Amino acid sequence: MSEIVFSETAKREIEKILSRYPTKGAALLPVLHLAQEEFGVLTEGVRAQVARVLDLPPAHVEGVVSFYTLFKTKPTGRHVIWLCQTLSCDLAGTRSLLGHLERRYSLKPGGTTADGRFTLTMAECLGGCGTGPAMMVNWDYHDRLTPERVDEVLKKYD
Amino acid sequence: MEPVLLKRIDIPGMAEIETAVANGAYANLGKGLGMKPADLLEMVKASGLRGRGGAGFPTGAKWGFAAADPKTPRYLVCNADESEPGTFKDRPILERDPHLLLEAMILSGHAIGAEYGFIYIRGEYADAYRILARAVDQAYAKGFLGKDIQGSGTRFECVVHRGAGAYICGEETALLESIEGRRGQPRNKPPFPASVGLFGKPTVINNVETLANVPFIVEKGAAWFKSIGTEKSAGPKLFCVSGRVNRPGVYELPMGTPLRALIKDVCGGVPGAKRIKAVVPGGVSAAFLGPEDLDVTLDFESVAAAGSMFGSGGVIVLDEDDCIVSATLNIMRFFKHESCGKCTPCREGTYWLYNVLHRIEEGGGRAEDLALLLDIADNISGKSCCPLADGAISCVVSSVKKFRTEYERHISEGGCPFAAREAGAAKA
């Protein structure tokens, strides 16, 4: 396994993050976000590197990464769809979108399209309840979804 | 009521500091920072402001505990982890008037003697995070944040801390754990954060909307604030309405607005003029209200008297064709997923409640299941270290009580009587 090294830009950003907190440990969430942006996936090697940079026990980093749903430890498709399934969105039609995603894209919750373009993850309340059903693609919010609108939105993600 | 919190929300470009200042942002800093901290704290106490995150704790009293603690530094933390299903009221402020929140934090920090503030924002609000982080940078550049704010001698530093997907981090001590770089699991209390909070120091944690009231209280006074709403629940309130209404959205109305008026007049009623079956009045931790409860007024006391909880202002409306078992199952899946796992009754209890609800909805319900649901709920109630568990059982206890026959029909008919609508929805 080749060594995982943060870029110079990322290293400077880590210094900036550390200056905002009275303890090194408090920088863990922001540094994990940064690492995920930098490396795409928080692999075992990335997690170990984060632990080294912040002088934290690797087991502590493992525990934190596994606790939060937005930290990725496994490869996904190029774009991740987070489809909200909580009550308001469900009332507004999440299930019809699920049916559509399966028929049109052969995409089931937890699955990835054969071409590696999309991974579908079911999300709990995204705070888009008034304009549901809502989904996030990567970090972009899309709402008032219908099957047609889902097609339109997904076209933008190659 | 003239809008207060949302009065600038439709002005384009409010996230930019020049536009914000031109439209009145930071205008109350001079007055507020010119006041003695104790006087400012007294003003907020006198206003009757109560926490808008769900618990309704008197804000001035909370501030008083931390301000009286001699340990330093003190911290002010803004809870922007808006994650209670049905709640989307803080998002407009965060995205479209972020400088209001920063002004509010500077003033609140002054009142409690906190020179350091953290805004904890849920990880999914990536846009709001970027907007807020930029607003903080701009506020530093213009001297609204930093060691000597506008020559007032007051210091306030502010950091935006982004969560990473965990409902429980809206619980204040879990939130503190998460800022400190740990799993977001609630702490045992006491000690309370007011004395042992962030990094072991006295800490005040307030919701976005709670804080956003502060600049207006400074501007217009405690008596003005108290003149809005009811005697015990003062001030304006953001209500976010979703589900079966014609005009869902975020509305700013006085505390004490009748639920029926909110649904019918403000939100245009239920599509197809269907009857209302149930309403979640304040996020899914609040018990269901039934059609017989629609005359309740929306304030802390009245919703509690009706057997539910005012909560976050997240109102979800179900109509006569919605299945109460399906809705309860949906809510329980949420809590099963979001239970942090620390306390056994919550971790195991939400799992079993979900399983039993699931088999009822899917047609495998047994005659003894209703008693079983209530028994599991009873074994969760009051037996964990944070309010998540008690919030999780509200939907079960209230729906079994108010809609027992609907559960019984699921069991006797071997399936969901509303399946046709749901199948239609899945095919559409």
Image (spheres, rainbow, N blue to C red):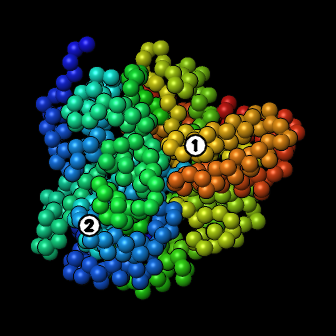
Q: What residue did someone put label 2 on?
A: B71
Kind of residue indicated by mark 2: Lys
| Camera sees residue A134 | no
- Answer above or below: position of B219 versus B20: below
Left or right side of A18 for A71:
right
Q: Position of residue A76 (x, y in %)?
A: 41, 22
Q: Is residue B423 above or below residue B15?
A: above
Q: Position of residue A67 (x, y in %)?
A: 43, 37
Residue A106 visible (yes or no): yes
Quadrant that contains the C terminus of chain A: top left
Amino acid type of the residue that numbered disc 1 sits on in the rendered structure: Thr
Against B183, residue B217 (above or below) is: below
The subunit carrying tag 2 is B
What residue is drawn where x is 19% and y is 44%?
A18
Quadrant of res B95: bottom left
**Place of residue B324 in the rendered image (x, y in percent of width and height, measured from the top left):** 73, 48
Q: CA distance from mark 2 to mark 1?
A: 34 Å
- Which one is in front, B170 or B234? B170
**On the image, which quarter does residue A66 sit in?**
top left
Q: Residue at x 51, y 21 (%)?
A: A111
Image quadrant for the N terminus of chain A? top left
Question: How many neighbours does mark 1 have within 10 angstroms: few (below 14), some (14-19), or many (20 or more)?
Answer: some
Give the structural element (helix, strand or loop) at label 1: helix
Q: Residue furthest right?
A: B412
Using the rendered view, name the quadrant where residue B281 is placed. Answer: bottom right
x and y, in percent, of residue B364 in the image: 80, 32
Q: Residue at x 36, y 43 (%)?
A: B182
Instruction: Tell me the SS state at disc 2.
Output: loop
Q: Which residue is mark 1?
A: B344
